[in-house]
């Protein structure tokens, strides 16, 4: 039998040329660029002003104060995923009441755009004599285009990864990650998921580009939704990115968590975070991706980027509940820095 060949181009450093081309690292308010004419490359967006509430001194302090290094042993490679215990999984399973399932993945973008510097390359071959179709897929999934899960070896700070591991000792161009790779989640992730729907909180269809989401926004949502985020939860921030894209066209300056939100993750013992963007909306000095750096490196919290939370928002509103059973399993690429995923919410 002919098998599909899946070719993944994986970035081994967070600010490689490929990733930098598809990540929006600026902060503040900005007007989204309109979609370019057909055949014309998208214009580079003008960076908005930085209105982050956190300084580089805050980030440096939080790298130590919020650290989970050693919490689960000096050889631990799972980080905050340790908070998803068998008891937590059993509690999450009880959230599946109606059996309704909702995908949290956006269909891969296949055309170059402001938010898709490297779209999916896809080709199909027909073996005429056998009546069989085979295909090839090529993608560089880190960045702002594809729904994916970051492994803990994906991002470093000051030369170090989670639990004090040296980036240079863990990650090599030829071999990938010899620790903390995506294969640690081969058995899958099952826990309570919580949708944080900020456009619904604010009474708008979507947030404008580069909007900062602050801790008080999250806490206001908890109050409105009648729930509380707790240990072992996976939290998902909806900014309305895909709803805006459908109406206004592609744009690069995505909204996300302000860096000052990071202490909340430690205080609530969140296990996983995700959003319909890339989490980060501000950059300060050595912290080009502050939420990525604080979450992955200090806290050991894995990240889901570029989720599509539009259908989930509709389902949650229809069911009048904003937590659900969350299930996902990555492609267990040996030594991989991450994986494309299709997370499922079950109500």
Image (cartoon, grey):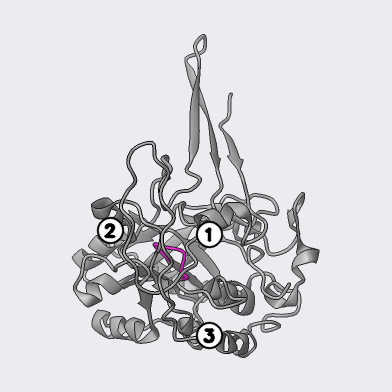
How many residues crowd mark 3 within 10 Å: few (<14), some (14–19), many (20+)?
A: many
Tell me which label, 2 or 1, sits earlier in the chain: 1
Marks 2 and 1, how far apart at CA? 23 Å
Residue at the extreme right: 169
Residue 322 position within the rendered picture, expressed as x and y whole percent measured from the top left = 30, 72
Q: Nearer the viewer, residue 84 or 169?
A: 169
**On residue 149, which mark appears?**
1
Marks 1 and 3, how far apart at CA? 20 Å
Residue 313 as seen in the image, left or right of residue 80: left
Secondary-structure class at tag 1: strand
Q: Nearer the viewer, residue 120 or 178?
A: 120
How many residues crowd mark 2 within 10 Å: few (<14), some (14–19), many (20+)?
A: some
Verify CB contact (< 8 Å) between mark 1 and mark 3: no
296 shown above or below 265: above
Q: Nearer the viewer, mark 3 or mark 2?
A: 2
Q: Nearer the viewer, residue 262 or 196?
A: 262
Q: Which residue is mark 2?
A: 244
| Quarter location, residue 298 | bottom right
| Residue 78 visible in the snapshot | yes
Q: Which residue is mark 3?
A: 266
| Quarter location, residue 56 | bottom right
């Amino acid at each position: 039998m002919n098998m599909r060949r899946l070719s993944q181009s994986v970035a081994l450093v967070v600010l490689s040329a490929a990733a930098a081309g598809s990540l929006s690292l600026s902060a503040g308010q900005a007007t989204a660029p309109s979609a370019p004419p057909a055949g014309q490359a998208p214009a580079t967006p003008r960076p908005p002003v930085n209105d982050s509430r956190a300084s580089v001194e805050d980030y440096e302090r939080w790298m130590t104060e919020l650290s989970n290094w050693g919490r689960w042993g000096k050889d631990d490679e799972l980080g905050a995923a340790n908070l998803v215990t068998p008891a937590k999984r059993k509690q999450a399973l009880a959230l599946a009441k109606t059996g309704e399932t909702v995908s949290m993945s956006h269909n891969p973008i296949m055309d170059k755009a402001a938010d898709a510097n490297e779209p999916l390359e896809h080709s199909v071959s027909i073996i005429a004599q056998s009546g069989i179709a085979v295909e090839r897929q090529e993608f560089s999934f880190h960045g702002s285009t594809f729904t994916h899960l970051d492994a803990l070896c994906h991002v470093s700070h000051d030369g170090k990864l989670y639990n004090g591991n040296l980036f240079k000792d863990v990650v090599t161009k030829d071999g990938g990650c010899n620790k903390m790779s995506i294969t640690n989640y081969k058995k899958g992730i099952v826990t309570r998921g919580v949708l944080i729907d900020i456009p619904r909180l604010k009474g708008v269809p979507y947030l404008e580009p580069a909007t900062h989401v602050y801790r008080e926004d999250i806490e206001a949502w908890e109050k409105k939704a009648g729930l509380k985020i707790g240990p072992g939860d996976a939290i998902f921030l909806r900014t309305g990115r895909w709803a805006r894209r459908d109406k206004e066209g592609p744009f690069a300056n995505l909204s996300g968590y302000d860096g000052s939100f990071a202490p909340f993750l430690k205080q609530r013992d969140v296990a996983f975070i995700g959003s319909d963007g890339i989490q980060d909306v501000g950059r300060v000095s050595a912290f080009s991706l502050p939420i990525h750096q604080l979450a992955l490196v200090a806290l050991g919290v894995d990240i889901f980027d570029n989720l599509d939370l539009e259908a989930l928002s509709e389902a949650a509103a229809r069911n009048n509940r904003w937590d659900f059973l969350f299930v996902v399993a990555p492609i267990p690429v040996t030594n991989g820095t991450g994986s494309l995923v299709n997370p499922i919410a079950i109500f």
